[in-house]
Image (cartoon, helix red, strand yellow):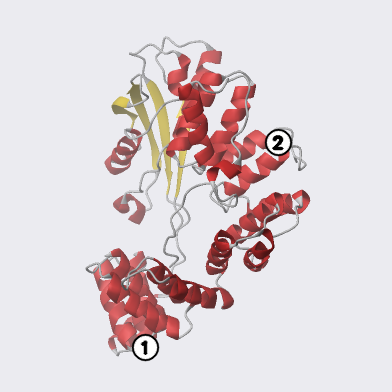
Amino acid sequence: MSVAILFLAAAAAIASVHDAAEQDRIRQAMKFDLYACARPSYPPAALAQRAGGQSTLEIKVDADGKVTDARVAVSSGRADLDAAALTSISKCAFHALNTLGKPPDKRFRAQFIWKPGEPPRALDPALVMRIQRLAEEGDPTAQNTLGTWYEQGRFFEKDLAQAAALYRLAAHGGNAYAQNNLGVLLNRGAGVARDRRQASFWYAKAAGQGHGWAQANLSWAYGHGSLGEPNMEQARKWLTRSAEGGLAAAQVRLGLLMLERAAYAEARAPGAQWFARAAVADDPAGLYYLGRSYQLGVGNEPDDVLAAALYRRALGRSDGRAETALATLIEDGRAQAEAPDEVLTLYETAMQSREGGAFYRYGLVLERRGDHALATALFRHGRTLGDCRAAMRSIQIQAGGASLRAIRPVSVEQCGDPLEPRPQGWRELY
C-alpha cells in the first residue's frame, strides 16, 4: 500500500499581516523549514481505514527556531491524524522562518495533507482461503505467503508474531524466502526476540539456496560481526554472489565497496561496471551512481551528457540525489536545462525528499543573490540532514573565517568519497 504525506506551508500569521509580499516571504521560509522536517508516521488505524484529511496547525517559534506552542487550528476530522501532525511539527526547526525578523508573539500556520495512497488490489477470497488451507496442511510456500500477509497487514490485521511463526514453519520446511524473511524479523527484533546470530543462521540457509537478498543480508551480517568478529572477506564473497545473481541493490553496494578500496584510478573501473549492470535493470541507485562516475570521471571517462541522461532516468526515484546532481550539472554549465527555472525546481524537489545536498546548493544560490540569512538557515538544515558540505559551510560562517560575499563552494574532496559525500552506514539490504 503506497502512502503519501504532503506538507504545505500556509500564511497564518496573524490577521494583522495584510502585506501580500510579507505573506509570500512567510510561505517561502516555512516551505524550506517544512522540507527539512522529519515526516510523521501515518497512524495505523487511519491507514487501515484509508482515512485522509488536512490538519492545519498554528504554531509559535522561539529565537532558536524551536516550536514553543502548537495547536490544531482546523482539524482533519480525525484526532489521530491531528495528534501525529502536532507531534511531528513540535520536532521541526524553523531556522528560515526566523530570518524574517518576526515579532516574538506572532503565530503561523502549517498544513499537513494526509493521503493514504491507492488501495491494494483485492485478492479473490477463495484464493485466500486456499492459501490458509494449504498452510494448515504444512505447505511451506503457502506458509510463507500467509506470513507475508500478516507482516504487511494484507487481508488480516498486521501481526508480526504470527508472521514470524509462519515463517519459522516454512523455514524449517526448506523455503528460502521464509528463511530470509525470518532472518529479517530476528535481526530487527520484530515479532520475535532480537537474535542476530539466529538471523545469520537463517540467512545462510537461504543464501545457500541462491536467494539473492539472503546472500546480501548474510554479507551484511559478516561485515557487522553478527557471527563474531567482522569478516570482510566473507562479507565480500556473499555480496559478490548476490550481485552476480542479478540483485541490483547488491551490485550497487559492491560497486561502492570496490571504489572505496581502489588504491589507484585504474582500479576503479570494475566498481563502476557494477553500477552499469544495475543501471541496465533501471535501478535508480545504479543510474545515480553510474551518473556520478561519469560526472566525476571515477571509474569512467568524464562524460557530462551521459551523466545528465542517467540522472534524468533516476528522477523521482533516488531520494532527491539525482535531482541535486542534475541541477548541479546544469548550474555549472555542464548540462542543458529543459526549462528556465529547472535548477531551482530540481533543488526544491530534492529538498522535499530531505536531501541535505540540495539545501547546501540552494543556499549557495541564495548567497549569490545576497540573501545570506536565509542561505545560512538552509546550510543549518543541510548540516542537520548530514550533508558534509553544508556542515563545513555552517562552520565557516559561524567562525567568520570566510567572507559571505566571496563564496567558494566546499569541494567534494573535502568531504571524503566523491561518489557519496554524505556519511552513511552500511545498512541491511533485505
Q: Residues within 10 Å of mark 1 (few under 14, many from 20)?
A: some
Eyeballing the image, is 73 above or below 284? above
Q: Which residue is mark 2?
A: 331
- Front-lying residue, 160 or 51: 160
Q: Residue furthest left?
A: 193
Eyeballing the image, is 358 above or below 107? below
Asked which secondary structure carries label 1, the reply is loop
Q: Residues within 10 Å of mark 2 (few under 14, many from 20)?
A: some
Left or right: 263 as drawn, with respect to 31:
right
Residue 181 lies in quadrant: bottom left
- Front-lying residue, 176 or 286: 286
- Front-lying residue, 422 or 112: 422
Q: Residue at x 55, y 62 (%)?
A: 261
Residue 264 lies in quadrant: bottom right
In the rendered image, residue 343, in percent from the top left (x then y), is placed at 67, 36
In the rendered image, residue 37, in percent from the top left (x then y), is placed at 42, 37
Answer yes or no: is residue 128 visible: no
Eyeballing the image, is 54 above or below 239? above
Q: Which residue is mark 1?
A: 174
In the rendered image, residue 259, in percent from the top left (x then y), is placed at 59, 61
Which quarter shows the C terminus? bottom left
Eyeballing the image, is 15 above or below 355? above
Answer yes or no: is residue 62 visible: yes
